[in-house]
Image (cartoon, rainbow, N blue to C red):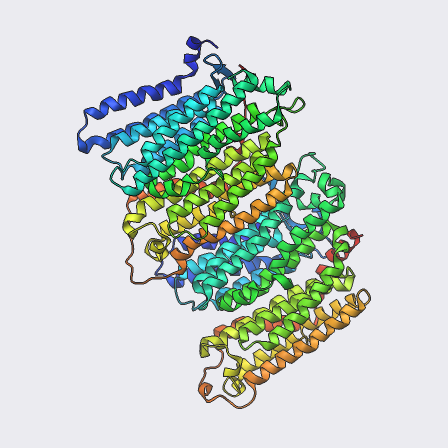
Amino acid sequence: MSNLNSIQYFIPELFLTAAILALIIVDLFLKRKQKSIIAYLSAAASLVAGFLAYQQFSLPATSIFQGMLVLDSFAIFFKILAAFSTVIVVFISLDKFRETAEYFILLLIVTLGMFIMPAVNDILMIIIAMEIVGLISYVLAGIHKTDLKSTEAALKYMIYGAVSTGIMAFGFSLIYGLTGHTNLYDIQMTLASGHVNSVAMFIAFMMVLAGLGYKIAMVPFHFWVPDVYEGAPTPVTAFLSVGPKAAGFALFIRFLVTIVAHPSSGAADTFVQNVDIQAPFLIAVLAVLTMTLGNFSALNQKNIKRMLGYSAIAHVGYMVMALVVFNKDAFGAIMFYMIVYLFMNFGAFWILESLSSKLGGEDIEHYKGLGYRDSFTAVSMAVFMFSLTGLPPLAGFIGKVYLFAAVIKQGWLILALLGVLNSVVSLFYYVSVVKAMFLKQDDELAPIQTSLYHKIMVLILVVPTLVLGVYWSPVIEFTTNSIGLFFGR
Amino acid sequence: MGLLSLATFFPLLGMVLILFIPKKNISAIKIVALVTTFLSLVLTSYMWSQYDYSLHGINMESQFQFVEHFSWIATYHIEYFIGVDGLSFPMVWLSSLLSFLAIIASWNIPKAQKGYFSLFLLLATSMMGVFVSLDFFLFYVFWEVMLLPMYFLIGIWGGPRREYAAIKFFLYTLAGSVLMLLAMLAFYFNVTDPVTGGHTFNMLHMFDQNNHIGLLKTFDGRFWLYIALFIGFAIKVPVFPFHTWLPDAHVEAPTAISVILAGILLKMGTYGLIRISYPILPDIARYTSYALAVLGVINILYGAFVAMAQKDLKKLVAYSSVSHMGFVMLGMAVFTEAGINGAVFQMFSHGIITAMLFLLVGVIYDRAHHREIDGFGGLAVSMPVYTGIASLAFFAALGLPGFTGFIAEAMVFIGAFPVYRVLTIIAALGIIITAGYILWMVQRVFLGKLNPKYENIGDINTRELSMLIPLGILTIFFGIYPMPVLNMMKMSLNYLLTLIP
């Protein structure tokens, strides 16, 4: 589609861009006390952008901007998810960044990047979208200029990011060299027609994996995660663990179904490799490494934020595990898991954010006896922890069932076995938080009073975690409807 | 909503009510817990009076009773499908009875009563749910939900090593249940629904070998799935190498929770094997039966010997459970009518007897604040009534004729002897060792010279009697006239045997 015609399909992104520019100007006229208006406006902006994206849901899938981007329900799903996670993060950050208006504007810019990431249809767009998200994320991680840990986090994040993006770009250049195309669909066609050296393709695949693996925090590209998660301000950590990661998965899936595989001729919902490079097996190995390393490193953590950082790696492992089967079951399972993960992970981070000042820190130690000081928050935290472990009747369990089911259906039983055993390991560290809260009674500590705002936020996040564990039909239908991938120039 | 759902979810309703009662109003909390579990017991008892003894259940929906069958998650073929037959109903009734009695046993729980009773009621619902579920997914959800309250009940209200015991219980059982999850999903994808042609979690469809496809057509697939399921259930039983969580959990748990653990939770393992593993994979059940029988005999002997070595009264009772569950396994493994009926009757009978034993240990612990067997002596002098009831319970555990335990064990031996002669003879030695440790313990605790420390110890009180006497009557009644239970079981179990090649 020509550029001019494409603009009508680019409204959510255009709206976001306009909102960003408008907010920068509005910010100039606001007094220090009034800066929180920016926060509300940015939440509204991303809500509207999400709504505008939803409006496009039923449009026929097509490519826009001369094949640079695509517009399909798969991309729209991730756009809505991105907008939604930004809204929640704005409210999580509201207290800490009340007077830092630029923070919220930066968040919106990342959201714009996350809108483009799932919709890419060209190698160049992949790099541009990833860099929009990446560069702003570095700034967000280091937004506390005077905090040493925060600046260290930002620097580490950036160096790793720069290196892995560089490697990925090199991988893409190999792919371009092999096929002569930058458009993903053209690459797929060329690769599928044969005549491409599988060794060269394998090397290119590995190099691209470096960049994608870094984005979603997959082993062995995960080294930045614990330090960045611990060092960055808690709301930023929460954001990084959900929003950009979801967009990263969207990109990963898009990469897999175009450059690595193509739809098999018989059934449209399964994919076969363009060039046989043993990609499923390689992904399976990486998935097992990712979840095992994440879980075992989390075992000894004293700091909950750091622990959640490692556990986030483990959750990536579970999701990557589903990717080995290259079919719509797996994509649907990952999308469903992202929704579930959004609620439970944001829930845990929100409690961490809002309570750590009252408890004097974010170590497990500080949560001792919380069950007797503020039972509502403690019970909710326990719900998030058990949901992250994957116990019924909580949403995390259903998410895991879908992930494992996708793998088991195709007969990867050993992989599934390693996955479920990993979730037993994860129980140990999640439950250590619960243990501190409920099993260690400390009568000397006074009850904690929390604000109404805190309670409402907890409720907003805990109710879906509970309800989706018992009744999830509408959500799974929505995700199943959203796996419409578009292939074309 | 039918009777069975009501009976299952009454405790959960009680939990919701309790959440709205202020923390300070302890008596209201207790009364809600008592009333809801009592109503559940009344309902299951009423259902027993309405029970049709001529239906066999097992693999036909029309043969089940009190069936409720609704769609839950249509896109994934998950159903809310519950019902009872002769295999599950005795356990359903027993769990409603023990839940009610355990609430009485928890009457004086020292702290955080609101949390305790709400968690307990959640536990009660999930236990009932496990026994009534006929949809594998539903079964799994109930099975797992049980772990959460159990973890807290042991971990918060337990003894000195409660944290260790609670996490050990949690990790062990979760490790088992994730294997079950794996097997469940594998069954789901390798079974077709005869009506719709899609996949299904409906257990009854899984039982029909004609619905099996793919993995379930291969011996290796069937074998490994059976093993995965078996480990999941074996940890719960607990079968010998997986038993180490049991003594810790039982000893550290508060009395009422030990009652539930030993009385109901252990039976879920063997129940699951008979309900799920046997009908889905009958050939593998047959193939591995000798191993199961050997494990059963190991359980009998090992449990009995270790029980003999215990200094702690509660640990002794805990290991005696390991030993008694061995009889269930031996009876299950032989596929004779007497054997399998004996096994399930042993599940029922051991549930009653071991509940009494744990309650009795609780009674003495409340007074003496320790459970050292050698720390007592001559209690018969200062606590005559208690000694009377305790001897009754311990003799029942020992398998004396006139009590349920005797009937169950005798049936297991009768059933097992023609099949595995040597094993049965070895297992019979277990009876002697059991008599040994029980009589030795009775002698040290109740007979001999009165320990002057306990001269003025109070005898058993009315509340405690009100729990023990019904159980005592039941074990004698069913020990003399077991037909109400046996008739119910035999329809289902004898039919089940016809399914096994």
- In the image shown, does B27 or A403 lie closer to the viewer? A403
Percent across and percent down for residue B183 are 64, 46
Q: For residue B230, which quarter of the picture? A: bottom right
Q: Is residue B372 above or below residue B185?
A: below
Q: Residue at x 53, y 66 (%)?
A: B248
- The residue at the far bottom in this view is B449
Q: Which one is nearer the viewer's eye here, B372 or A123? A: A123
Q: Residue lying farthest left?
A: A31
Residue B24 percent location from the top left of the image: 34, 61
Above or below, B80 against A174 in this view is: below
Q: How many marks?
A: 0
Q: How far from the left and from the top, in percent, is residue A303?
A: 37, 50
- Residue extending farthest to the right is B418
Is residue A10 in view from this perspective?
yes
Image: A377 above or below A316: below
On the question of residue A274 being in view, the answer is: no
On screen, residue B188 above or below A359: above
Image coordinates of residue B138 in percent, x first then y, are 59, 47
Q: Is residue A154 left or right of residue A260?
A: left
Please name the residue shown 51% across and 69% down the image.
B251
Displayed quadrant of residue B270? bottom right
What residue do we see at 66% from left, 67% from top?
B299
